[in-house]
Amino acid sequence: NHAPVSVIGLGSMGSALAQAFLDAGHPTTVWNRSPGKADKLLASGATRAATVAEAVSAGDLIVICVLDYQAMREIVGSAGDALDGRVIVNLTSGTPEEARETATWAAGRGVRYLDGAIMAVPDMIGGADTLIFYGGSKAVCAAHASVLTAIAGGGAYLGEDAGLPSLYDVALLGLMWTTWAGLLHSLALVGAGGVPASAFLPYAQAWFEHVIGPEIPVIAGQVDQGVYPDADSALGMQAIAIEHLLDASRAQQVDAGLPQFLKDRTEQAIRRGHAGDGFGSLFEVLRRPSGEC
Ligand code: NDP
């Protein structure tokens, strides 16, 4: 299946996407606001579209990847009637709300729309394990799945809600940043005690492997069931250890924002009756900060 594809937006990511389609043998038409960015792809066999409308008309599948949704909507909107009945896969990053609004707009314009979130850097595009989340039209995803494997072998369709890819995207980024922030706080704490990160590293890595990692499915299971049993390590007991972390951070003159956050949320969970539950019960205060069900 060497269906013709158009790629709109040739920044670092769009260029990698277009190159991957070319490598997989798809006739590829490209358009970018600054036309010079197409030159390298033209040398690899791509065709330049003079206008957005031309790009939109050339591909069975139109992949767009630009800075943000505002730019995406401006560009695609400029194609006019050429949009009718076309298939757009929007891989621009944004919020779930922007994705849902764009899906509604697309439906009103007779555009078949699939939203996507790329969980990779440009170098990883085309890889067998590279992950792109998709959401929106199931029919579009099913009809074009084999073409989309050219850019990412590990594509995952999440459902008809076009906001889901962005939701998974920000949730995974949040997991990454908060985990890294926790690691950096621990390194700041031992660093203030004169310990180089390299000396602490083996213990941090073993902690991830033997303590943090194995708890992930346990906590996920508790969240789904809405019960958080942990008699051996109840929140009331952990709250005392969190107090130690806060005191030690202050004493070492390390930023105490993260331990303060943990103390506040733990106390909130205890006030809501979770003193005898495990750490997973913090889900309840994070999910419903005001306490309503
Ligand atoms: P770049 O900054 O390299 O490219 C931005 C692209 O957007 C260019 O093609 C630029 O055109 C275009 N653009 C910006 N504003 C406008 C506008 N008003 N009208 C028309 N075109 C416009 O960004 P990337 O390619 O790296 O990223 C593109 C998308 O991919 C973003 O949403 C990003 O979050 C996402 N992404 C990027 C990753 C990465 O590692 N790079 C990873 C995962 C997602 P011009 O060349 O004319 O300036």
Image: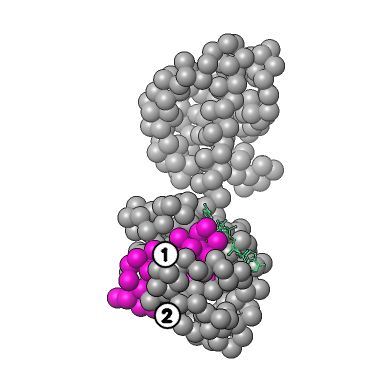
Q: How is the image coloured?
A: one colour
Residue 64: percent from left, percent from top:
53, 69
Q: Residue furthest bottom?
A: 81
Residue 32, above or below 203: below
Residue tagged 1: 19
**Which secondary structure, mark 2?**
loop
Instruction: For ligand 1, give the image quadrant.
Output: bottom right
Label 2 C-beta lies within 8 Å of the nearest ligand 1 atom: no
Query: Mark 2 or mark 1, which has the lower sequence index?
Result: 1
Q: Can residue 11 be seen in this view?
A: yes
Amino acid type assigned to the residue bearing label 1 in the image: Gln
**Which secondary structure, mark 1?**
helix
Q: Can residue 232 be seen in this view?
A: no
Mark 1, other Cα within 10 Å: few <14 / some 14–19 / many ≥20: many
Disc 2 to disc 1: CB gap under 8 Å: no
Amino acid type assigned to the residue bearing label 2 in the image: Asp
* Residue 229 lies in the magenta stretch: no
| Disc 2 from disc 1: Cα separation | 17 Å
What residue appears at the point 56 percent right and 81 percent down from the top-left corner?
Answer: 50
Residue 234: percent from left, percent from top:
51, 23
Range covered by the magenta-colored residues: 1-26
Which mark is on residue 60?
2
Which mark is on residue 257?
none
Q: In which quarter of the image is the N terminus?
A: bottom left
